[in-house]
Image (tube, rainbow, N blue to C red):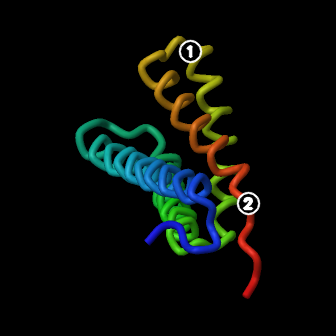
């Protein structure tokens, strides 16, 4: 359930979009972690501790995005700050991907991060009951 009687129709629509984008981002982060695990079994790993760190970061990051999405789904404000922060970080990652000319990753990441960032930021906090 997204939106309520205290949400304006515009805010409820933005919440629904942010909810969907955060869930997609969480799935992508989990998929990247799974890819790294598969890559570890199919290639010779030169830095196994770095790989463990990347996989743990993917698990924590994906879980954080799903928690933020749950905050938006239940109309709580605890999802807003992590969503904005995660997408600000994603914009920094996209910057370095642009510098590396990795367009196939940089362009979609920039679009999704900007959309989520600018849709999540102005959603007004709901009054406490």
x, y percent for residue 38: 27, 46
x, y percent for residue 3: 53, 67
Number of disc labels: 2
* Residue 55 showing in the rendered view: no
Rendered position, 102 above or below 94: above
Q: Judge left or right: residue 35 versus residue 20.
A: left
Question: Looking at the rendering, which quadrant does residue 82 occupy?
Answer: bottom right
Looking at the rendering, in which quadrant would you find the C terminus?
bottom right
Residue located 58% across and 17% down the image? 98
- Residue sitting nearer the eye, 21 or 32: 21
Q: Secondary structure at mark 1?
A: loop
Looking at the rendering, in which quadrant would you find the N terminus?
bottom left
Q: Secondary structure at mark 2?
A: loop
Q: Are marks 2 and 1 in contact (CB under 8 Å)?
A: no
Name, please, the residue furthest toward the bottom. Answer: 129
Q: Of the residues under marks 2 and 1, which one precedes in the sequence? A: 1
Residue tagged 2? 124
* Residue 105 showing in the rendered view: yes
């Amino acid at each position: 359930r997204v939106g309520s009687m205290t949400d304006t129709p515009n805010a409820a629509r933005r919440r629904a979009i942010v909810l969907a984008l955060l869930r997609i981002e969480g799935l992508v982060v989990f998929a990247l972690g799974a890819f790294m695990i598969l890559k570890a079994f199919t290639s010779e790993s030169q830095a196994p501790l770095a790989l463990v760190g990347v996989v743990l970061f993917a698990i924590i990051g994906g879980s954080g995005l799903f928690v933020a999405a749950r905050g938006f789904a239940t109309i709580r404000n605890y999802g807003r700050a992590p969503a904005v922060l995660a997408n600000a970080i994603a914009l920094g990652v996209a910057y370095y991907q642009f510098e590396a000319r990795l367009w196939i990753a940089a362009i979609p990441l920039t679009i999704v991060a900007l959309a989520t960032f600018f849709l999540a930021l102005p959603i007004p906090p709901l009054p406490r009951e």
